[in-house]
Amino acid sequence: MLGTAAVAAQAQTAAADATALPPVVVSATGYPQALSQALPSVSVITRAQIVQSGAQNLTTLLQQVAGVQITSSGGPGQPGNVFVRGFGGTDVLVLLDGVPMNAQDSTGTAYLNNFTIDQIQRIEIIRGNVSAIYGSGAIGGVVLITTREGSKTPQASVSVTAGSRNTATVSANASGQVGNTALQAGISRYTTQGISAINPAQLANANPNANGYRNTTMNGSIVQTLAPGQSLGLRAFRSEGRASYDSSGAYASPTDTNLSSTTQDLGQLFSDNQITAAWQSHLSLSQQSTTNTTQSFSAYPYTGSYRTRIQQFLWRNVVQLGAGWTGTGGVDLQRQSIASVTNGIPSKQRDAKAVFVGIDGVFSGNELQLNLRHDAIDGYSGQNTAYLGYGRELGGGFKAIASYSTAFNAAPLGYLYAPYYGNPNLRPEKAHSAEAGVQWAQGASVMRATLFQTTATDQWQYDFTTSTFQNIASSRTRGLELSGRGNWSGWAYDANLTVQQPVNTSLPGDPTLQRRARSLANLALSREIGPVLLGAAVHYSGARWDNGPSGRVTLGSYTTVDLTASGAVSKEWSWNARVQNLFDKAYQTVYGYNREPFGVFLGLTWRPAL
């Protein structure tokens, strides 16, 4: 029988392995490689880090990543945006198990505010445009989310968390293997009273009540091994979120009730096959749908509901070419559609077809990566994109890195066909990026300094002259990004600093883009002290501007501090605690909308011996 100290150490190993072991990423090339080998700028958040963070939603995790900025119109479940190096909304592509999640409605976003973390296995974030690897929408970057995976040995867990603002989470997960069949299933329920999203002192006719949120997420998979190297699997995911939200202005009143609900579904049939000793093939047939409904119960009642869908056939291949070289290639076929449950955007659909190839390898201390992709989307001419990356070993763990890439973004169907403001003649956005940097890596430690610039043209913007979207905007972001992760004297650390200039180049004077900070910084530290793993996360954002009732206003810079602790009670029981916004910093990322104050959350997990 293990003693309590030994059990605690065993539990902490899982939480610390994200920095104690060399990180591995898949997103940079399409197959696993060490983070230090990746030429694109990539960050990874493992399941161990997710557990250790104590975070309850995806956006809390993402805001700790280099170059990533989160905005939200309130607390959990409220509308928001994710910016990567100054680009956000439709310019950040989100994939769930390889399937695009960006909705085809008039937002073009992936509704990341509806993702809780209990059924997420890992997250990878690529900064900079990589359309040559992932296609339309990858101008600012890509967020790749992988759902929970099963294990060969039987495992089960039940977790309960409770805390401030009547917040509670209950989740259960189980996995194991019976013969050649691997099974996994999980469900989680999250509820919170929330906070009053809107500040009535800043916005007129606002409703000052607390805006609650609840979410139920389910995830499951079954994988059958047919023969060595040959497997067939089925995966399903569903997230249902419901929130109340606040409104303001001439048509609102303090007694209004507003509700929104978002449901995201994914079903996927996939096959992984070792065709030859050097050739791996992955086939998947998927369907992803997002349904969003808003209801206003007021003097001016309103109901709007849209369902968007992406059906995808993906064939991705990885071939070992010998002498340190690897080739990738395949096809990506999608049918994208939107249907209005109520009156609104007419039902539309289109086909998007793509072929892609890539090669990367090492020769005489040099590393080279080349990716090419051709996309053919109904209503547009063919789009060609490329990524060229180069690395040179300098000795002593140092490596010089440079890259150049091109990208495009096809307008969502909602931008094209929404009544009144849609424009079916919108051209794709275009972009190109350049990066140069130096990296130092030794063991699990990886440090990187990167100079970057991305320029985008033909961007979509509402034109008040025509009252429709038009290709009249352009922007540029350039800056310096410093990041490092690893271990030092018993401390695990993950730190980053981004200094950037996201500017609107379609206006005179290159003004900074709305809600974008010019400086971002994060520091996460953890250390085992006896049977307890302690952690702290600091997040800083520089000042930004936003629109207020009387014109432009400045949202001040802010710093928040979160604390975490975890340990074992016995062989089967463990605990965790999280303090959110330790110093109760009052701040806003959207003018007039409050963010979460100080909060304390305690959790207990039971992992029965099976």
Image (tube, rainbow, N blue to C red):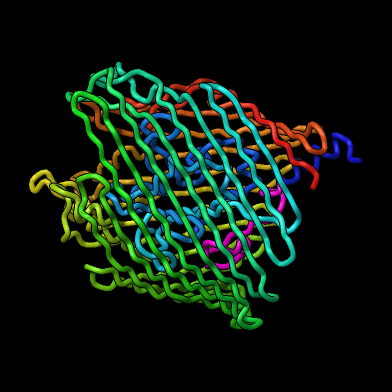
Image coordinates for residue 276, horizontal then vertical, percent? 63, 83
> Does residue 209 appear to the left or right of 300 in the view shown?
right
Is 371 a magenta residue?
no
Residue 351 appears in the rendering: yes
The residue closer to the viewer here, 412 or 524, is 412
> Does residue 116 appear to the left or right of 176 in the view shown?
left
> Does residue 501 appear to the left or right of 76 in the view shown?
left
Image coordinates for residue 144, horizontal then vertical, percent? 49, 55
Q: How many marks?
A: 0
Q: In the displayed structure, would residue 427 be above or below residue 114? A: below
Q: In the displayed structure, would residue 22 be above or below residue 575? A: below
Q: Quadrant of residue 417?
A: bottom left
As drawn, which residue projects farthest toward the right?
1
Image coordinates for residue 592, horizontal then vertical, percent? 32, 25
Q: Quadrant of residue 434?
A: bottom left
Residue 35 appears in the rendering: no
Q: In the displayed structure, would residue 509 be above or below residue 389? A: above
Q: Identify the residue at horizontal 51%, vertical 38% (top origin).
A: 57
As drawn, which residue projects farthest toward the left?
465
Q: Identify the residue at horizontal 39%, vertical 34% (top origin).
A: 78
Magenta stretch: give its range: 17-39
Image coordinates for residue 99, horizontal then vertical, percent? 45, 60
Q: Quadrant of residue 246?
A: top left
Q: If the image is split into quadrants, where does the N terminus sit? A: top right
